[in-house]
Image (spheres, rainbow, N blue to C red):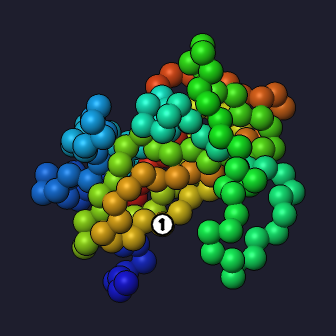
Amino acid sequence: RFISGLDAQLTMAEIANELQLENILYSRTGDDSLEPTTVRLIEGIQVNLDLTGRHSEGIVAFRVRRNPDPIDLGKVEHYNPEDYLEPILKSRNGTVEIKRGEHYLFATKEVLRMPGHLNAELKRTSHIGIRGDMHFAGFIDPFFTGDLVLEIKHDEIENVVLEGDEIPISTIHLF
């Protein structure tokens, strides 16, 4: 990737212009097809945690297990993912509890389709109001299509309960 100047990040006006040319965010319908979704521009393109479990048999997250056996990268299709990740189901009252110091993997509610002429960075932002790195940011390559997966942990004294179908968690900054 080649850039000119100190900051190649698109301004909010440039992002709005890009969105008029090509949609970037989609939501899943009941039959798992994709349809364009409303894009909220708040210091970038806002994405939300999906806490419905609607498209994943009720699984809303995975908790990373502590001290699993090491992985031998030379072994293909050898390991059971549940030896390393514990599926977290949405509770009957519609909440998900995340425990202090534990690491979780959540997917975004939105599906992203990155155009070939852009790439992006997922910024560490959260509007939930809890202290600590809510997720660890990453980069999104041109032509990427799929769910964004966020690694989340928090540093509050008490466990945190997330509730609702979607939680604003991060923004995507385009380059």
Question: In the current view of this chain or complex, which residue is farthest to the bottom?
Answer: 2
Identity of the residue drawn at 25% across and 66% down: 115
- Judged from this view, the residue extending furthest toward the right is 67
Residue extending farthest front:
78
Instruction: Tell me the crowding category of disc 1: few under 14, some 14 to 19, or many 20 or more residues within 10 angstroms, Cα based.
Output: few
In the rendered image, residue 75, in percent from the top left (x then y), is placed at 69, 77
Residue positioned 30% across, 62% down in the render: 114
34 vs 127, left or right, is left
Q: Is residue 32 left or right of residue 154?
A: left
Split into 4 quadrants, where in the image is the N terminus?
bottom left
Residue 151 percent coordinates (x, y): 63, 52
* 74 over 88 or under it: above or below: below
| Secondary structure of residue under mark 1 | strand
* Residue 129 screen position, x and y as percent: 62, 31
Q: Looking at this rendering, what residue extends furthest in the top direction?
A: 93
Residue appearing at x 25%, y 44% in the figure: 34
Foreground residue among 71 and 34: 71
Residue at 21% in and 41% down: 35
**Relative to 167, is 63 above or below?**
below
Q: Badge 1 is on which residue?
A: 139
The one nearer the camera, 30 or 121, is 30
Q: Give the position of the C terminus as an image quadrant.
A: bottom left
**Taking 114 as reference, is 124 above or below it?**
above
Can residue 116 be seen here? The reply is yes
Q: Is residue 74 left or right of residue 107?
A: right
Can I make out residue 17 in this image? no
Spot occupied by residue 43 in the image (x, y as percentages of width and height) = 40, 47
Name the amino acid type tagged 1: Phe
